[in-house]
């Protein structure tokens, strides 16, 4: 009969013992490669082993702020909510950086483990550029 993958062999044994439903077996057989050569050919599709991974998407401070910080800082940081309004904040850039990186016990989580220093600087620049909506 030729090459039989371990999965195909396992399923044939289940069927022979009557412990698997025919529908399940047909589904798995339809998805499994029929031969070692076909399995090798399918393995060649998509990601090649050892090939460099696709570059991660660029850091977008506006999107990050909206999806993470926006829960506490409404309207993109323009209004207070659970957290303070950040537009026109009296804090220095260094204070905002430190707050994002280290948090504030009982008030704000620390994000230093989630973002690089450069990404935090981009978030600070985003906050400083906030203007009222027209």
Image (tube, helix red, strand yellow):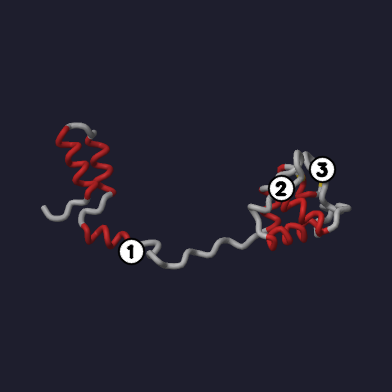
Q: Is residue 23 left or right of residue 106?
A: left
Which residue is more in the foreground, 103 or 68? 103
Farthest-out residue, left: 1
Q: Could you classify mark 1 by the number of other residues whose Cα lies within 10 Å: few (under 14), some (14-19), or many (20 or more)? A: few
Tell me the quarter of the picture where residue 39 sits.
Answer: bottom left
Which residue is more in the foreground, 97 or 81? 97
Q: Which mark is residue 59?
A: none
Question: Does the CB distance between marks 3 and 2 fall below 8 Å?
Answer: no
Mark 2 element type: helix
Question: Of the residues under marks 3 and 2, which one precedes in the sequence?
Answer: 2
Residue drawn 18% across the image and 51% down it: 4
Q: Which mark is residue 69?
A: 2
Give x and y (percent) for residue 112. Answer: 68, 53
Q: Could you classify mark 2 by the number of other residues whose Cα lies within 10 Å: few (under 14), some (14-19), or many (20 or more)? A: some
Q: Which mark is residue 44?
A: 1
Which residue is more in the foreground, 78 or 101? 101
Q: CA distance from mark 3 to mark 2?
A: 12 Å
Question: Does the CB distance between marks 1 and 2 fall below 8 Å?
Answer: no
Residue drawn 24% across the image and 46% down it: 7
């Amino acid at each position: 009969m030729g090459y039989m993958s371990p999965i195909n062999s396992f399923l044939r044994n289940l069927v022979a013992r009557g412990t698997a439903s025919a529908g399940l077996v047909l589904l798995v057989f339809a998805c499994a490669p029929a031969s070692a050569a076909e399995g090798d050919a399918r393995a060649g599709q998509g990601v090649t082993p050892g090939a460099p991974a696709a570059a991660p998407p660029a850091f977008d401070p506006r999107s990050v702020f909206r999806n993470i910080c926006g829960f506490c800082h409404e309207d993109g940081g323009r209004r207070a909510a659970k957290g303070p309004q950040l537009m026109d904040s009296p804090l220095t850039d260094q204070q905002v950086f430190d707050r994002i990186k280290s948090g504030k016990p009982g008030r704000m989580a620390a994000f230093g483990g989630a973002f690089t220093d450069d990404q935090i600087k981009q978030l600070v620049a985003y906050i400083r550029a906030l203007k009222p909506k027209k």
